[in-house]
C-alpha cells in the first residue's frame, strides 16, 4: 500500500484547542507515579496533546513538544519489532487476553504456567523484550533506533536517571522475570533482560515524537519511509491487543469511553490509533489508581466524542 498523501492540514487543531481549554478547567488530575522515584517530581497539571496525520504532518497543543518518560508505551513498539521478526511463534510464549489485573501483578503467572496473559502487562513485555533480545542482541537499542527513525528525531534517548531509579526499585519486575525463567519462558540471563527492559521503559519522548512513531499502526504496517514493518494482518493484531489490553485492568472502560486502540504508560502518556486516518499522543502525569493518565483518558474521550472518529 502506498502511503496516503494529503495536502498538509491541521484538521483537528481546533478540536485539540477546545480540549486543552476544557482540560485546563478540570480539577483533580490524579497523582504522578511514585514507585519509580524519578517520575514522582512531574507536575500533574502538565498537559500536551498531538495528532499525526498519515503523511507525517504533526501538530498539537500545550506541552506537546516536552519530553516525558514513555514507560509502558514502548511495549507497543517492542511487540511490533519482535512480531515482525518471529511472527506467530511469539504467541506460544505470551497470550493475548486481557488480564483483568494490575499491570505489575504476579498472581496469574503461576496458574498459567509462566505464560503471561498479554504483551502489555509487565510480565508479557518482559517476555517480548527477552525474545527481541535473543534475536537482535540489543532490544533497547533496536527500539531506540526505530523510535528515532519514525519520529524523525535523532535526539531521542534513554533517560539514565529513570533507568537507574527503576533498577533500584525493580524487585517486582525482577520477581516476574525470575518466576517466568523458572518455567523456561525467559531465554536470557535475567540481569541482562532487566537492564534491557528498564532502558526500554526509560526512553524520553514528546507527544509529537510518539504520535509520529505510532504512525505505522494507522498505515496498516507501513513505516514512515514507506517500507513495511508489519503485514496488514499483524498491524490489525497489534491494534486489537492495544484495544483489549493496552490500559491494563481499565481496558474495558477505555474502549467504552475512547473507542480506539490505545496504550498508556506510568509516565502519564497515552498513544491512540485511528486506523487509516491518524494517530494521537496525549500526556499528563497525574494517574488514576490503575496507572492511566486521568487528563489523558479524558482528552481522548473528548477527541472521539467531538470528532466521531473511533473504530466503532
Ligand atoms: N517501567 C514501568 C514498570 O515496569 C512500566 C509500567 C507502566 O508504564 N505501566 O513498572
Image (spheres, grey):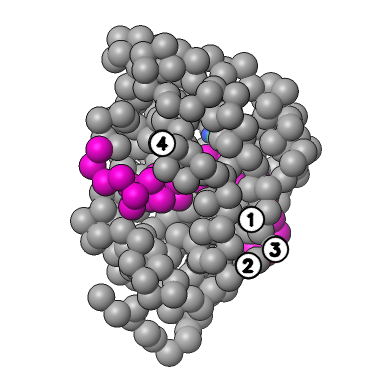
Please identify, in this view, whether the residue under mark 2 or under mark 4 is nearer the observer.
4
Where is residue 179 shown, x and y percent of the image? Answer: 45, 13
First-in-chain label (2 vs 1): 2
Indicate the secondary structure of the residue bearing disc 2: loop
Q: Confirm whether residue 105 shows in the render.
A: yes
Residue at 56% over, 58% down: 145
Q: Name which of mark 4 and mark 3 comes first in the sequence.
A: 4
Q: Secondary structure at mark 3?
A: loop
**Residue bearing the label numbered 3:** 155
- The mark closer to the camera, 4 or 3, is 4
Tell which tag, 3 or 1, sits nearer the viewer.
Answer: 3
Labelled pair 3, 1 in contact (Cβ < 8 Å): no
Q: Which residue is mark 4?
A: 131
Image-quadrant location for residue 200: top right
Q: Nearer the viewer, mark 2 or mark 1?
A: 2
Mark 2 and mark 4: span between their CA atoms? 26 Å
**Does the residue at mark 2 contact the one at mark 1 (Cβ under 8 Å)?**
yes
Image quadrant holding the C terminus, namely bottom left
Q: Element type at marker 1?
A: strand
Q: CA distance from mark 3 to mark 1?
A: 9 Å
Q: CA distance from mark 4 to mark 3?
A: 27 Å
Disc 4 under 8 Å from ligand 1? The reply is: no
Amino acid at each position: 500500500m502506498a502511503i496516503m498523501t494529503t495536502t498538509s492540514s491541521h484538521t483537528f487543531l481546533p478540536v485539540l484547542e477546545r480540549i486543552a481549554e476544557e482540560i485546563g478547567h478540570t480539577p483533580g488530575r490524579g497523582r504522578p507515579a511514585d514507585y519509580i522515584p524519578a517520575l514522582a517530581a512531574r507536575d500533574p497539571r502538565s498537559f500536551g496533546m498531538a495528532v499525526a496525520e498519515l503523511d507525517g504532518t504533526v501538530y498539537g497543543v500545550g506541552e506537546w513538544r516536552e519530553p516525558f518518560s514513555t514507560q509502558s508505551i514502548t511495549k507497543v513498539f517492542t511487540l511490533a519489532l519482535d512480531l515482525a521478526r518471529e511472527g506467530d511463534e511469539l504467541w506460544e510464549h505470551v497470550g493475548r487476553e486481557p488480564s483483568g489485573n494490575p499491570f505489575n501483578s504476579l498472581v496469574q503467572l503461576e496458574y498459567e504456567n509462566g505464560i503471561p496473559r498479554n504483551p502489555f502487562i509487565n510480565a508479557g513485555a518482559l517476555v517480548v523484550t527477552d525474545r527481541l533480545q535473543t534475536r537482535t542482541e540489543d532490544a533497547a537499542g533496536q527500539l531506540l533506533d526505530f523510535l528515532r527513525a519514525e519520529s524523525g528525531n535523532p535526539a531521542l534517548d534513554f533517560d539514565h536517571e529513570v533507568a537507574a531509579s527503576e533498577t533500584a526499585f525493580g524487585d517486582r519486575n525482577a520477581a516476574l522475570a525470575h518466576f517466568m525463567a523458572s518455567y523456561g519462558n525467559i531465554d536470557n540471563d535475567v540481569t541482562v533482560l532487566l537492564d534491557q527492559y528498564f532502558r526500554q521503559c526509560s526512553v524520553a519522548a514528546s507527544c509529537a515524537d510518539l504520535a509520529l512513531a505510532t504512525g505505522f499502526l494507522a498505515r496498516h504496517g507501513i513505516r514512515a519511509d514507506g517500507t513495511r514493518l508489519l503485514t496488514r494482518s499483524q498491524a490489525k493484531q497489534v491494534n486489537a491487543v492495544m484495544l483489549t489490553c493496552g490500559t491494563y485492568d481499565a481496558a474495558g472502560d477505555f474502549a467504552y469511553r475512547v473507542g480506539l486502540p490505545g496504550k498508556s504508560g506510568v509516565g502519564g502518556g497515552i498513544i491512540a490509533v485511528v486506523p487509516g486516518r491518524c494517530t494521537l499522543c496525549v500526556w499528563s502525569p497525574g494517574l488514576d489508581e490503575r496507572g492511566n493518565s486521568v487528563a489523558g483518558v479524558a482528552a481522548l474521550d473528548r477527541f472521539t466524542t467531538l470528532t466521531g472518529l473511533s473504530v466503532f
